[in-house]
């Protein structure tokens, strides 16, 4: 029987509270410390956690370096804001810890490449919690996709009308940057394919309550020759889709649909031999369970940074296409990000690893080999 994985959590905001509950519910993990820049936020989150924790039950602090050195944690769960993901993950990896980080992997593809190189230098694991993959229905849709033969088109419609207030209503690209990464990542998962290029447009309907573009359409060419088309709007009252979006796959032997909330279905003109997928655990719980198992068994995991960077590249490429009006290739985005990463890297060992990549795709493959 293995000891529970000792976890230091960083970030105690809205999502941080959900992670505290998730860690508390997993018998194979134990919280040993909580870091937040705001000590009162950290203490309030601990008090609200299941069972109610206080200083003394676990270490609480504002100084990540000190907490890494003193808590004897084996892994960091990073639930801080995206702009802090690069520095937190770098510090944790070089302190010898593995990291499970909230999406997005980082703010930019360039920062994400730096972190992939940091895993290669340290030999530690860095997995992104792309929580919407952890859904038995999504796994079933992928099983249908595999059984239906070659894919032609995968379409996702996302129409919601939330009034968040705050930063989302001020950002230039709220839908593409804050939300669409979930659907872009799910498309890679369902198709078992990676993005090649994208043409995208974004716009803001006249009635929108967002300052930036609340609507977008994007068409991705995928590595299996299929097309993934995304149409989304965040100021779309009436007949709203689920938060996962509404999906349709058209393939060689038939079609499959998923409303994002209920079991998917398929039509192949008869029965297909499709395995019933096991429940991977729902969202954060599934993501944490997979991380703990992958660390213990030293097994490959879904959403390791070297793989997940391609989901963030889809976002960056779609934004670039929407801003320039031209089709953008994913390789262009990756190679440009590599140049930025080399120019801005502050660690010599990480820069040396980045310099050694023959191309970005080959550099990423070094981590997944
Ligand atoms: N998977 C999902 O569906 C989902 C949903 C919401 C948010 N998220 C992600 O979760 C992360 C956190 O989002 P949130 O809504 O909880 O944000 P939040 O603003 O509510 O909380 C972030 C917390 O991090 C702390 N923090 C910021 N920088 C820090 C640093 N350098 N060191 C330590 N603490 C720091 C802040 O003080 C704050 O308490 C983001 O990456 C976000 O994209 C994911």
Image: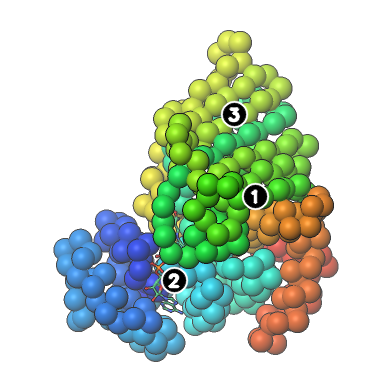
CA separation in Å, label 2 and label 3: 34 Å
Q: Is residue 194 left or right of residue 326?
A: left
**Label 3 vs 1, first from the N-terminus:** 1
Of tags 3 and 1, the one toward the viewer is 1
Q: Is residue 48 left or right of residue 368?
A: left
Q: Which mark is residue 79?
A: none
Whether the residues at callouts 1 and 2 have beta carbons within 8 Å, the answer is no
Q: Is residue 169 visible?
A: yes
Q: Which residue is mark 2?
A: 80
Q: Which residue is mark 1?
A: 203
Residue 25 x, y percent position in the rendering:
27, 56
Front-lying residue, 243 or 339: 243
Looking at the image, the residue that sits furthest to the front is 206
* Pointer 2 residue Cβ closer than 8 Å to ligand 1: yes
User: Which corner quadrant of the image does residue 346 belong to?
Assistant: bottom right
Q: Which residue is mark 3?
A: 248
Quarter of the displayed picture in which ligand 1 can be seen: bottom left
Front-lying residue, 284 or 229: 229
Of tags 1 and 2, the one toward the viewer is 1
The residue lying at 76 percent from left, 47 percent from top is: 199
Whether the residues at callouts 3 and 1 have beta carbons within 8 Å, the answer is no
Q: Secondary structure at mark 3?
A: strand
Quadrant in which the N terminus is drawn? bottom left
* Pointer 1 residue Cβ closer than 8 Å to ligand 1: no
Q: Is residue 60 above or below residue 11?
A: below
């Amino acid at each position: 029987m293995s000891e529970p994985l000792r976890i230091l959590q960083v970030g105690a905001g809205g999502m941080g509270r959900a992670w505290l509950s998730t860690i508390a519910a997993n018998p194979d993990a134990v919280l040993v410390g909580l870091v937040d820049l705001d000590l009162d936020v950290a203490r309030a989150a601990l008090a609200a956690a299941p069972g109610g924790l206080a200083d003394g039950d676990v270490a609480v602090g504002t100084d990540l370096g000190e907490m890494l050195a003193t808590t004897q944690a084996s892994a960091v769960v990073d639930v801080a804001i995206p702009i802090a993901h690069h520095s937190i993950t770098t510090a944790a990896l070089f302190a010898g810890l593995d990291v499970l980080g909230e999406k997005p992997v980082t703010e930019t593809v360039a920062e994400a490449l730096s972190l992939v190189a940091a895993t290669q230098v340290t030999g530690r694991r860095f997995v992104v919690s792309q929580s919407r993959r952890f859904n038995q229905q999504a796994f079933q849709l992928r099983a249908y996709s595999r059984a239906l033969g070659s894919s032609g088109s995968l379409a996702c419609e996302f129409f919601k009308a939330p009034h968040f207030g705050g930063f989302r209503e001020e950002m230039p690209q709220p839908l593409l940057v804050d939300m669409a990464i979930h659907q872009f990542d799910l498309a890679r998962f369902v198709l078992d394919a990676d993005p090649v290029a994208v043409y995208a447009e974004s716009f803001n309907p006249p009635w929108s309550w967002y300052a930036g573009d609340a609507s977008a359409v994007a068409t991705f060419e995928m590595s299996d020759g299929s097309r993934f088309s995304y149409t989304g709007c965040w100021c779309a009252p009436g007949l709203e889709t689920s938060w996962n979006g509404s999906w349709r796959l058209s393939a060689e032997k038939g079609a499959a649909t998923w409303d994002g909330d209920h079991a998917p279905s398929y039509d192949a003109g008869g029965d297909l031999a499709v395995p019933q997928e096991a429940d991977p655990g729902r969202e954060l719980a599934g993501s944490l369970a997979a991380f703990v198992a992958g660390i213990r068994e030293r097994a490959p995991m879904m959403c390791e940074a070297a793989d997940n960077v391609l989901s963030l590249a889809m976002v960056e490429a779609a934004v670039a296409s929407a801003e320039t009006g031209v089709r953008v290739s994913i390789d262009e985005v990756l190679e440009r990000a590599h140049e930025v990463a080399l120019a801005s890297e502050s660690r010599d060992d990480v820069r040396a690893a980045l310099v050694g990549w023959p191309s970005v795709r080959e550099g990423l493959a070094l981590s997944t080999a």
